[in-house]
Image (cartoon, helix red, strand yellow):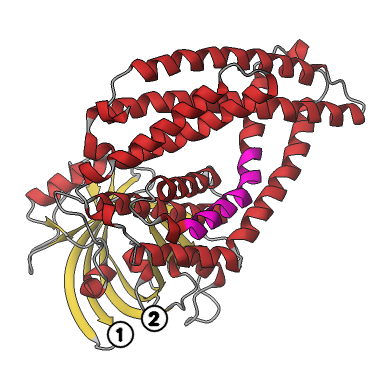
Amino acid sequence: MAAPSAVTERERKYEIVAGSGVPRLVGVAGVETQDDPVEHVLDASYYDTATFRLARSGITLRRRVGGPDAGWHLKLPVSADERQELQLPLGGDPHKVPGRLRRLVRAYTLGEKLVPIARLRTDRFAHRLAGADGRTVATLTDDHVTGEAGGESARLDEWRELELELDPDAEPGLLAEFDRALTEAGASASPWPSKLRRLIGDRVPAPRRPGKKPSAGDVVLVALHEHYGRLRRADVGVRLDVEDSVHQMRVAIRKLRSTLRTFGSVVDKRETAALASELQWLGRQLSPARDTEVTEARLREELDALPSELVFGPLRQFLTRHFAREAEEGRTRALAALTGKRYLRLLRALDALLADPPLTAEARKPAKAGLRKPLRKAAKKLSRAEAAARGLSGDELGVALHEVRKKAKQARYAADTVKSVYGKKVRVWRGNVKAVQSTLGEHQDTVVGRDVLRHLAIAAHGEGQNGFTFGMLYARDAGRAERLREKFRRQWRRLRKGDRPGWLG
């Protein structure tokens, strides 16, 4: 089956008083004409697991007939008003979710079967809103909905709602203008993100939210939930080969590992050690794909910055061939991991951890009292790594500075977790730590880059090409590395002398 097409959907839904007319929006947000309604009858069957795993994450999966976009639709939340919709045409077994869509939501279903959970019939009256140039700005629909939800106890419901959807090419800010006009006309914002959630809302467990005075455990669990959500969203992007998705997934993995490790006194590290190890495995499966992205982009940028007289031979074509092979190998390895049973077991373990976390006695303490020690330990590990790098040179210094970078990243992630608890001084310290981490990240790029350049020069020589340009880039990287080390030393002094809580040490 072909890859699903993707569209960005920006819309808001509104309640409307029974018997009232459809508001006129001419003159709002550049609208010059509001067309007479076009009627569509939409019949949609919705799919989810028996425990509503998709709905709990704000995801909608349906098969709809009728209307201009009949087909299978997978809607993924981006923000409160925005969703990414992936579409496949009708065809095949109407009662079986296409395999392509099943695989895309595997990180959410965790392998559970997708079953019909509801059916919605919508009598839709769609008004096209156009600007002075005749182009569509938005569509206002008057929807009369009848819904039926299955399960242990069947449910029937019917309602009327308005839906204002921007054209994909319209400015997102226009949504606020339409919102004001519709509110002034008597409509009120719907409390439901979708028709499906309105129908099955009370069957979907509400997420647990910490109170005004959160415990240490509350704060750490909020962070873990956030990173888990980021991992699953990136999973879909990796499968679709969306730019930067591998990077985002690796960031989520690192943050999960770092949070489990740093706050092991809150979420019992004896119970999470195996999970942290599996997260490390997953990160390694994605590493080649991401490393190739970073290295190729960096080398091309450096090559483009050179005067043409210093670029000997068809080096850009050579890089294209070289990195195309590496990119394909990296993507194959990443997808093999995401489609394997080991990854599914990892996701289930993460899900189980968050459903029933192994909290310690420290977790019950108020956040301000229970989270100081983990952050202080992360800061001390960073200081020890920096001290160990002093006096070193050559390859040993490169290895040591990479360790400082890793400890800086862990300290920054720890600060991200607790900054809402401790306020400005931790945020300032966190900013200084990030500056150190970023500089050492650039330094590590030069270390890796020089190794890659050496291998590229050897390969180019083997093909009879001149390796001069690669050698020159190697020398430039060596000089850049020295300047970055000097920058790091200045930033380290700023970190040590800068604002920070006294208890941080």
The amino acid beneath tag 2 is: Pro
Residue at 23%, 66% in the rendered image: 206
On the image, the x and y values in percent for residue 454 come to 79, 26
Region in magenta: 273-292
For disc 2, the neighbor class at 10 Å (few under 14, some 14 to 19, many from 20) is: many
On the image, the x and y values in percent for residue 184 come to 7, 48
488 sits to left or right of 461: left
Along the line of sight, which residue is nearer the eye, 111 or 494? Answer: 494
379 sits to left or right of 469: left
On the image, the x and y values in percent for residue 502 come to 26, 26
Q: Secondary structure at mark 1?
A: loop
The amino acid beneath tag 1 is: Gly
Q: Quadrant of the C terminus?
A: top left
What residue is shown with label 1? 150
Residues at discs 2 and 1 in contact (Cβ within 8 Å): yes
Q: CA distance from mark 2 to mark 1?
A: 8 Å
Residue at 28%, 81% in the rendered image: 149
Examine the structure image and report whether residue 325 is included in the region drawn in magenta. Answer: no
What residue is shown with label 2? 116
For residue 495, say whether it is visible. yes
Q: Is residue 306 above or below residue 198?
A: above
